[in-house]
């Protein structure tokens, strides 16, 4: 199902693939966390647009997207999952802004195709982003500055095995 530059694919009652492409060119490549998505059985769902919101409903979840509101974030996309008698609201579409001269942790920024991990030492914050392995894997950081000017932006990233196949610290 497509709504402007947003596309949604209902894979199962508890899994809806979301994709936003500002240029309307969607990728039909493999999905990091929905392997074999073309093999899922057809899932019944309903869709409705009302008061500027697209609502997709399966037997287990409800997804709402503010039509024409741009890339997914916690204000324009929500997901409510039925877990037994409980309803769980997921707000995983984060978009944080990093102020100048502030340490910002990647796991708090918007990312695609990655996961937060903590299985290696030396990280700060709640963990680190892992999984930069596929085309389309991305980290987005919005920076906020008080005045126009030049600013230094520093990123720290480690790669376990580089093109030289050596396991060593890289900065």
Image (cartoon, helix red, strand yellow):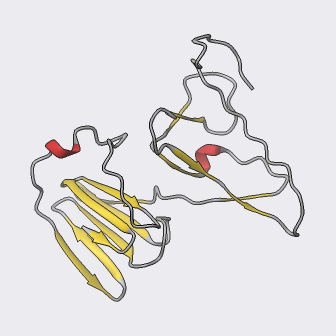
Answer whether residue 135 is visible to the viewer in this image: yes
Q: Nearer the viewer, residue 59 or 25?
A: 25
Q: Residue 71: x and y, percent?
A: 48, 66
Quarter holding residue 151: bottom right
Which residue is drawn at the image coordinates 89% and 58% (left, top)? 150
Q: Residue 28: x and y, percent?
A: 30, 50
Q: Residue 37: x and y, percent?
A: 22, 44
On screen, 72 above or below 16?
A: below
Residue at the extreme top of the image, as rendered: 166
Answer whether residue 84 is visible to the viewer in this image: no
Numbered disc total: 0
Quarter holding residue 120: top right
Residue at the extreme bottom of the image, as rendered: 51
Quarter holding residue 127: top right
On screen, 151 above or below 127?
A: below
Q: Residue 14: x and y, percent?
A: 23, 53
User: Relative to residue 9, is residue 167 drawn left or right?
Assistant: right
Which residue is drawn at the image coordinates 42% and 62% (left, top)? 20
């Amino acid at each position: 199902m497509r709504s402007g530059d947003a596309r949604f694919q209902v894979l199962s009652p508890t899994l809806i693939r979301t994709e936003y492409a500002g240029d309307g060119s969607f990728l039909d490549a493999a999905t990091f966390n929905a392997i074999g998505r073309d093999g899922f059985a057809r899932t019944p769902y309903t869709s409705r647009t009302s008061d500027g919101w697209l609502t997709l409903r399966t037997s287990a979840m409800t997804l709402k997207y503010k039509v024409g509101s741009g890339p997914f974030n916690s204000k324009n996309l929500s997901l409510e999952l039925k877990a037994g008698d409980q309803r769980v609201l997921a707000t995983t579409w984060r978009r944080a802004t990093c102020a100048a001269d502030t340490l910002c942790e990647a796991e708090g920024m918007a990312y695609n195709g990655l996961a937060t991990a903590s299985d290696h030492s030396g990280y700060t914050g709640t963990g680190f982003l892992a999984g930069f392995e596929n085309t389309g894997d991305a980290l987005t950081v919005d920076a906020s500055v008080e005045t126009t000017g030049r600013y230094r932006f520093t990123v720290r990233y480690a790669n376990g095995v580089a093109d030289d196949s050596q396991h060593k610290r890289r900065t």
